[in-house]
Image (cartoon, rainbow, N blue to C red):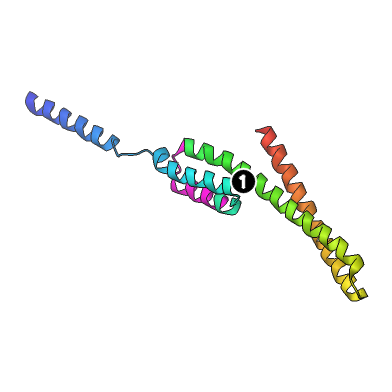
Amino acid sequence: MKGNKKTYIALVVCVLLLSSCEGKSDDERAAAMVSDIEQAVSKGDFRSALDSIVVLRSRYPKAVNARRRALELWQDASLLEAEAEAAKTDSLLKETIVAIDSAPTLLEQNKLRNRRDSLQARYDAAIGLTKVIREKNAGN
């Protein structure tokens, strides 16, 4: 009976050890994805990076270190994306303002004024977003 008890305990210990050795941790499996996200941010592909972070968070909910790094990348990518949008919109806004004066007809001038107003609203929103992101990042 004592021999069976020791064998049983040894068997349980072996099973527990084997089950704890599943292989790579979630953080190790998520590392490749984090690397891809970092590359996307460095290349300026912010939308892809943000989408990949959403996938990483759902696929590896227990990868604490990867999720922590993904949060930093999310903040960086969000800010850089908003700044890029503001810069692009500012450039289009300036072009449109110059084009208003050189438009040959009143109709074309009015169309350009409508475009200017739309671009101005888009620019203001992008600048507002960058301010909010910076303030939120400063608070963290």
Q: Residue visible at 81% across and 57% down? A: 121
Q: Which of the pair 95/59 is nearer the observer?
A: 95
Residue placed under numbered mark 1 in the picture? 77
59 in magenta:
yes
Q: Which of the pair 51/11 is nearer the observer?
A: 51
Residue 100, compared with residue 48, is above or below; it is below
Q: Position of residue 127 (x, y in %)?
A: 77, 48
Residue 77 as seen in the image, left or right of residue 68 = right
Would residue 1 be visible to someone looking at this image? no
Q: Residue visible at 86% across and 65% down? A: 99
Q: Count the marks: how many?
A: 1
Q: Position of residue 7 (x, y in %)?
A: 11, 29
* Main SS class of the magenta portion in the image: helix
Q: Position of residue 26 (x, y in %)?
A: 40, 40
Q: Which image quadrant for residue 72?
A: top right
Would residue 118 be visible to someone looking at this image? yes
Task: Assess disc 1: are there few (<14), some (14-19) or many (≥20) residues with their C-alpha within 10 Å of its C-alpha.
Answer: many
Q: Residue visible at 8% across and 24% down? A: 2
Q: Which of the pair 43/138 is nearer the observer?
A: 43
Q: Secondary structure at mark 1?
A: helix
Residue 3 as seen in the image, left or right of residue 112 = left
Tell me where the magenta segment starts and ends, as one range.
50-64
Q: Position of residue 120 (x, y in %)?
A: 82, 57
Q: Residue visible at 47% across and 36% down? A: 64
60 in magenta:
yes
Q: Which of the pair 81/97 is nearer the observer?
A: 97
Q: Which image quadrant for residue 22?
A: top left
Q: Quadrant of the N terminus?
A: top left
Residue 95 as seen in the image, left or right of residue 51 = right
Q: Quadrant of the C terminus?
A: top right
Q: Amino acid at mark 1?
A: Ala
